[in-house]
Image (cartoon, rainbow, N blue to C red):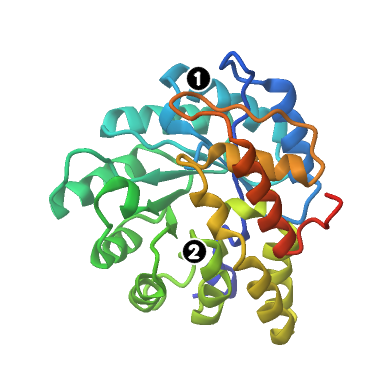
Amino acid sequence: MTQQMTQPLFSGVIPPVPTLFTAEGEFNETAQAILIEHLINSPVDGLFFLGSAGEFAHMSREMRLDVAAFCTRLVAGRKPVLIGIASCGTQETIEAGLHAQRFGADGVVVVNPWYNPLSESNLLQHFKRVAEALSIPVILYNFPALTGQSIPVQIIKTLAIDCPNIVGLKDTVDTLSHIRETLHAVKPVRPDFAVFAGYDEYLLGTLILGGDGCIPASANFAPQLTCGIRDAWHKQDYSRAVELQQSLSWIPPLYGLDLPFYNAVKYALQLTGLDISVHSLPPASPLTAEMKTEIENILQRAGVINKEGN
């Protein structure tokens, strides 16, 4: 196997980008463009639209397709674009993937179907059918806290072997052990298969274990921490990487201040100086004054903003 073939197609730090709305619940193209340009000018390695932080679960199918098309067109190849295409059914997932493919996405991200538990055979066939229907790369998304079912490591390995265009995994599991097990199972047979942590606190640990990066919401508003860890790791400046990971460790409580966490991420972006509105689709509600104060405190503790704000 050549050196080129052993390198993952996607790696590093890729933010799951928030989707921005007006107070009336319409897609806010102006604000979204501001956010996209901000992220393109940041050191992140790609942009992931319609992930968990992208609020896809509260959108209509038509809105999801519109958001995917708008964001892909606006990025225009300046950074890799990943589009979340998850649906409960296989056919709708494929249709969303074909739409993303048609508009020029660099890859798609597929979380397993939720609500109905699937047998391992049906789960495997779901991912295979999606991959076989598309010609662009597919990244698996394991988030059992929200889907109710973890993707078994053996299924990930089988898909990596059988489906060349399944190129990676975002592993949003609150333990490094699943990431470790996946790396040990898959990397020997697919060195180019990328394994990303989903949670901020496992970024450095994933790199240490031989993983390829992280897809954390904090990369939207704290790239100096997430991308700083990436850079320090590659420079073998391990003390700096540890220091930055310790700073990043203050961030995760932000995601639990309100459920869903969409507005918390948007407000964090606003606090760092980005001129965007903070609105999300129902059933999400506006942040309280107490929530806003605590988000500001969290960003200060992490060193993302100072006492006077940005």
List x then y, in percent, for residue 111.
Answer: 36, 46
In x, y percent, where is residue 93? Answer: 35, 33
Residue 161 seen in this snapshot: yes
Disc 1 is placed on an element classified as: helix
The alpha-carbon separation of the residues under discs 1 and 2 comes to: 28 Å
At horizontal 47% and vertical 65% (from top left) the residue drawn is 195
Q: Pointer 1: what residue? A: 63
Q: Nearer the viewer, residue 262 or 90?
A: 262
Which mark is on residue 197?
Answer: 2
Residue 218 position by quadrant: bottom right
Task: Left or right? Give the position of 301 relative to 257.
Answer: right
**Residue nearest the observer in this picture, 90 or 170:** 170
186 left or right of 248 in image = left
The type of residue carrying mark 1 is Met
Front in this rendered view, residue 255 or 294: 294
* Residue 149: image location, x then y, percent: 24, 52
* Lower position in the chain sequence, tag 1 or tag 2: 1
Circle 2 sits in a helix, a strand or a loop, which is it? strand
Snapshot quadrant of residue 271 = top right
Asked whether residue 17 appears in the rendered view, the answer is no
